[in-house]
Amino acid sequence: MERAIPIPMLILAILGFCYLLFPILVVVLAGLTTGEFLTFPPKGLSLRWVISFLQSEKYLSAFFFSFKLALMTMVVSTILGTAAAVFLARSRFVGRSALRAFFLSPVVLPGVVVGFALYAFFITSGLGISRTIWGLWVGHILYSTPYVIGTVGASLATFDVSLEEAARSLGASPLRAFRKITFPNIAQGIQAGSIFAFIVSFGQFEVSLFLSAPNSEPLPIAMYNSLRYKFEPDAAAAGIFAITLVIASVLLTNRLVNIRRLLERQDG
Amino acid sequence: MAYVEFKAIAKSFGNFVAVADLDLEIEQGEFFSLLGPSGCGKSTTLRMLAGFVKPTKGHINVHGRDVTALPPEARDIGIVFQNYAIFPHMTVFDNIAFGLVERKLSRPEIKKKVDAALAEVGMTGFEDRYERELSGGQKQRVALARVLVIEPEILLLDEPLSALDKKMREEMKFWIKNIQKSVGITTIYVTHDQSEALTMSDRIAVMDQGRVLQVGSPVEIYEQPASRFIAEFIGESNLLKCQVTTLDGSACSVNLGDVSIPGRLSSNASVEPGQDVALLVRPEMIRLRPIEANEPPKLQGTVSETIYQGSVVRYRIHAAGQEIMVEVANRPDLPRLNTGDNVATYWSAESGVVIP
């Protein structure tokens, strides 16, 4: 068959892609402007504001702060989310399906609610972590983990439990059966979940708004604060780097996972 | 003492009773089938023996040892699943080696045993393949090799042929039976397919609704079914409504229309004269030929339908107000009948089984 998609649908799809990719185009071009102010379309193209971003103490530290926070969040969310997904898939208890539905739709916990609840709790409980990276970490984990539960849960749903049972009756303990059989077969779901957790944390705004301190703020907060007072294109340049980082992290994880798989095949 | 003993085993899932009060004894080296329709509890029974399902009550003994509380990895029982459960991320070699690696054997030992297992199932040369590169029959062979290589006490087979096409199924039926015989391993086979159970088993337990209805050899199950359910589930059957007239031990005679016909009582059944019963006559046991004086059971009827099936011809006979299916070998020395022909049917007294 030459073309399986009807033409009206094809046109809609192309329009949809344009619509979705338009913000990226705006950010990239606005960041490459030669003008003094943030405009679209840009006035000429130069690396002026990219260099300005790279020399800006404020943006660079915010960028690396967000990077560190996203990595920390990714590690904990991946572990917690995977364990929770396995538990939800394997155990039977009253309210399991309600709990699963709750976790498989991460949108039920708006960031504003998470941020505000934690802010109020940190302030009034005197834990001493309000407006520190630790408080932010707690908030970001809370916000990102459901994404991991969702992706790992989806890969567990297609995983055939009899593989694990076969391993058990061949002499493997529950832990070994999980490590040698279940884990390699749901690794892609875990990997996707961890990328989600990283990206969600890196771009998180509402939770961070409540929990970040003035001198150590994540990139989205830094961009927002900066644009409130001046309309300079280095915010857009920061956006370029944020997009690049997200794309690079996806590509890199893909690469790493493939390499790991390759090694596994060889020594197995 | 039997090799495998189920003692008053029961399993419920919430309000659903999967297995109720099950007692079974399986001998060492036996090929034992659990046969029944889906949902009869046969798979649950197997999974309780494998250790995947904990019985609600009762005990399971293997070789005199109570294994009821043991986890699957401590039971020394091998299982082949319906979908074979070949580990998709491992090669055929690593699949078969899995149990040996868990038993911490040395590399050369593992290599030797896996090679021998591959040879035994005729899969030498497939070591480096992955599951997705194997056909259904090949997966079956790998799954069996993976289990046999650890030399378990018991082999469990959970509907292992149902995913194969008909031709392959016929082939694998004999292949599995041969392997089982040559290894001599005690085997429990779960199936809903009566022809598999009849062909392969030393003994069969017929199950329905969580209970064992009858245990016996294929011949006993087929020729002396204990109930109408078993008679209808196993093979094709004519169950003719009739009344007991006389009774003498296991020999009895029944009234079918206005003809008195001798039969024998099914095993363990008890009936009284005058009782409404069913007379089981298998289609292939009935002949349609001129009656001879010393072959008394006969019933006059008319052919209402003829079905040509190549190797056999089937006739639907209307007689004594009932429909009787008759199967006749397609041979030139046997008469061919047409719809509307009047015929006499007869069968030997042993072929008529009286079932309460």
Image (spheres, coloured by chain):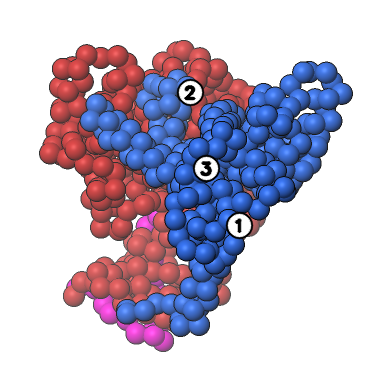
Question: Is A112 placed left or right of A55 in the picture?
Answer: right
- Look at chain A in the picture and name its colour: blue
**Helix, strand or loop status at disc 3:** helix
Numbered range of the magenta stretch: B333-354
Mark 1 or mark 2: whose residue is earlier in sequence: 1
B345 part of magenta stretch: yes
Q: Chain of mark 2?
A: A
Residue type of the residue flagged with mark 2: Pro
- Residue at the (38%, 69%) spot, across then down: B326
Task: Tell me the quadrant of the picture where the N terminus of chain A can be found.
Answer: bottom left
Alpha carbon of mark 1 to alpha carbon of mark 2: how far?
61 Å
Tag 3 residue = A53
B177 part of magenta stretch: no
- Look at chain B in the picture and name its colour: red
Mark 2 or mark 3: whose residue is earlier in sequence: 3
Same chain shared by disc 1 and disc 2: yes
Q: Is residue A104 visible?
A: yes
- Residue at the (34%, 19%) spot, across then down: B102
In the figure, A116 relative to B50: above or below? below
- Given residues B27 and A267, the one toward you in this image is A267
Q: Chain of mark 3?
A: A
Indicate the quadrant where residue B122 lies. top left
Mark 3 or mark 1: whose residue is earlier in sequence: 1
Tag 2 residue = A174
- Given residues B281 and A113, the one toward you in this image is A113
Tag 1 residue = A37
Q: Chain of mark 1?
A: A
Task: Tell me the quadrant of the picture where the C terminus of chain A can be found.
Answer: top left
